[in-house]
Image (tube, rainbow, N blue to C red):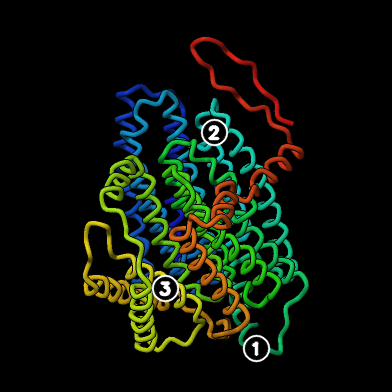
Amino acid sequence: MYLSSLFFFSIPLSLAIAGWLVGRRQTDGHQAKNHGQRLLALSITLIVVFIGAVFTKVLWPSPQSQHYLSVSNLSMVMLALVLFMGMILIAFSRNYMASEPRLNLYWRWLLTTLAAVSLVVISNHLVLFWLGWVGISLALHKLLTFYPERPRAALAAHKKFLLARTAELCLLVAFVCLYQAHNTLFINELVEHFNRLASNPELTLTTNERIAAVLIALVALIKCAQLPVHGWLIQVVEAPTPVSALLHAGVINLGGFLLILFGPLLLQVSEAQWLVLIVAGLTTLISALIMTTRISQKVRLAWSTSAQMGLMLIECALGLFELALLHLLTHSAYKAYAFLNSGNAINEDLQRRLAPAQEPSIWDWVLAAMVATGLVMSAAYLIQYQGVWSIWLLFGLALTMLIAQRHSHQLKASLWPAIGLTFLLLTLYSTMKTLFAFVLPINPSLRVSPLSLADLWVMGLFLSLFIASGLLRYQAQRPWVQRLSMSLFAGLYLDEWLTRLTLKVWPLRLPTRANSKTLKPQVSIK
């Protein structure tokens, strides 16, 4: 146990030391290339160290008691994700950021952010967890302001800075409440207690525990940029592309990790559970619709992230923690690829223009709904599913749209390839969901009952999203749909209200871009 913990601790420590060393002096072009090679070698070495730590845990297993670092399945999966994404970002940044004059500072704060994230995911101590959480925000702030002369980047980082301090204060109060209730700072002991509590209906939560649950839910909502505190996420696309990939693929999903970790507490406090269901549910619905009105590729991806994080938090609030972990991993991989590949957005748009989709007929929708429903119900029966049905409804609606929209103006696609793709997706989904149920076993007492009020609420949200997206796409000529589209394009003005409130609380002097003719004085917003 101690040897495995030593291996794990060497990972954030090595990343932090490497970040401090590489940021000590200014780098020229030749040094930048050498640094990139060394950092890529470091990332590969750390992956080898991680594999060694996993083998050590498997060969010499021992019960985890009062250890500061966690070697649980959840921690190992998250650490593997951090290292994999870190290697990808380092490899991409070698060429993408090579000509930047402040490259040494970029490397310093990138590695420091990765070190803080890795510390959070392997922490088994509330103090270490909180320090790593704060470290992520402070290091990421330096990356978000890498171009300090950009006003939008400065404003977004300013809002993110205030929201992060609010979340950190809430998390600190939550941890203090947990310590006062249990007189321990070790996370595994707290989680074991909450699991025992769920299995024994005669025991009840204390007031401190209920307060901690609500605060943890609030922290997760803030971290995942849920409405109305989402604006900074949309505006930080001004940062370098690797920073956007790091944020959307490896940092913002930590809110989901927090709820998965403290899930046994969340599901026993209805106030916290419904706070997540309502806020994250409405964010999923609204952000997914707003995304369809955006033209900029990076802005669309940012709204997509907000919607996807909302869906992940909904899964946590429904007790589907294995599905939330699967969602977290796949979303991270997809979003990293999407941002790093955003330069090809023009080519992809041209391909869509050359083969535009045809509006499905009523028969297409009916046939697609029948096929999707039959396949989804068959998959649920084969794996003997007994949980909530809202997630399967979402899957069925998505597959319905996939089958119905198979035609383009140039080609009448056959139904069988669409059915084959649907069958493949359902097989992959069912297999991965079953696999992650073994990786992350959940107390059956924490499962949300099927067709409960929470399940029905989420079903209503998914049906509303399906209907509204269809109207926006195929009934755009109607006046009331046009008014809805205009409101969505404005983001329902939620970010404007939050920005005004933020600048009233803490005014910011925004930089102005310098041009070749004149230099404008700085503008103060109050």
Q: Is residue 144 visible?
A: yes
SS under mark 1: loop
Mark 3 vs 2, N-terminal side: 2
Residue 518 occupies quadrant:
top right
Residue in view at x 61 percent, y 43 percent: 160
328 sits left or right of 519 in the view: left
Foreground residue, 467 or 163? Answer: 467
Which residue in the structure is indicated by mark 3?
Answer: 395
Q: Which percent across, then down, holds residue 199?
A: 61, 87
202 sits left or right of 480 in the view: right
SS under mark 3: helix
Q: Give neighbour class at mark 1: few <14, some 14-19, many 20+ (Cα, 10 Å).
A: few
Amino acid found under the numbered disc labelled 1: Asn
- In this view, 432 is above or below 94: below
Amino acid found under the numbered disc labelled 3: Phe
Which residue in the structure is indicated by mark 2?
Answer: 145
Q: Which percent across, then down, holds residue 468?
A: 52, 64
Q: Is residue 431 visible?
A: no
Alpha-carbon distance for marks 3 and 2?
39 Å
- In this view, 208 is above or below 51: below
Mark 3 vs 1, N-terminal side: 1
Alpha-carbon distance for marks 2 and 1?
50 Å
Which residue in the structure is indicated by mark 1?
Answer: 200
The quadrant the N terminus occupies is: bottom left
Callout in the foreground (3, 1): 3
Amino acid found under the numbered disc labelled 2: Thr
- In this view, 297 is above or below 209: above
SS under mark 2: loop
